[in-house]
């Protein structure tokens, strides 16, 4: 991640932590610059925790096409 964005990618906001069983949902905002694209958008990170460790992560962005272009996909 940091290589593609030359160190610019960051989660700029994380709030509204919600838990249900092993799952935690967090509303986030992330930003960076890569491949000539400036990215700033909200999203949701869904994390599954087992025995105190993150074992699964699912990331949802508000504009998937823009994020794919940002990462060069």
Image: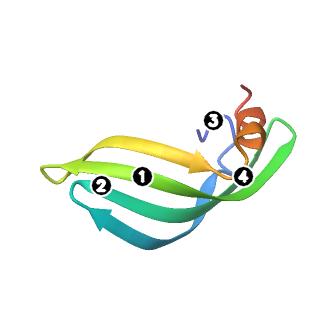
Q: Is residue 11 left or right of residue 52?
A: right
- Quick one: SS at disc 4? strand
Density class for disc 4 (Cα within 10 Å; few <14, some 14-19, many ≥20) is many
Residue under pointer 3? 3
Residue under pointer 2? 23
- Tell me the distance, in whole angstroms, between the alpha carbons under discs 4 and 3: 12 Å
Between marks 2 and 3 in the image, the one whose residue lies nearer the viewer = 2
N-term mark: 2 or 3: 3
Density class for disc 2 (Cα within 10 Å; few <14, some 14-19, many ≥20) is some
Give the position of the C terminus as an image quadrant.
Answer: top right
- Quick one: SS at disc 1? strand
The dot on residue 68 is none
Q: Nearer the viewer, residue 6 or 23?
A: 23
- Farthest top residue in view: 73
N-term mark: 3 or 1: 3
Residue at the image position 87 percent from the left and 39 percent from the top: 36
Between marks 4 and 2 in the image, the one whose residue lies nearer the viewer = 2
Q: Is residue 17 positioned above or below 54 on the image?
A: below
Between marks 4 and 3 in the image, the one whose residue lies nearer the viewer = 4
- Quick one: SS at disc 2? strand
Discs 4, 3 touching: Cβ within 8 Å: no
- How far across and down, in percent of the image, does residue 6 sit? 69, 42
Q: Is residue 38 left or right of residue 18?
A: right
Residue at the image position 36 percent from the left and 51 percent from the top: 47
Discs 3, 1 touching: Cβ within 8 Å: no
- Tell me the distance, in whole angstroms, between the alpha carbons under discs 3 and 1: 24 Å
Residue under pointer 1? 46
Discs 1, 2 touching: Cβ within 8 Å: yes
Residue under pointer 4? 32
Residue at the image position 21 percent from the left and 58 percent from the top: 21
């Amino acid at each position: 991640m940091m290589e593609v964005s030359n160190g610019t990618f960051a989660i700029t906001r994380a709030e509204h932590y919600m838990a249900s069983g092993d799952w935690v949902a967090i509303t986030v905002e992330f930003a960076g610059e890569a491949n000539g694209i400036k990215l700033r958008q909200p999203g949701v990170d869904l994390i599954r925790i087992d025995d105190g460790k993150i074992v699964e992560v699912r990331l949802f962005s508000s504009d998937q096409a823009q994020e794919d272009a940002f990462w060069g996909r």
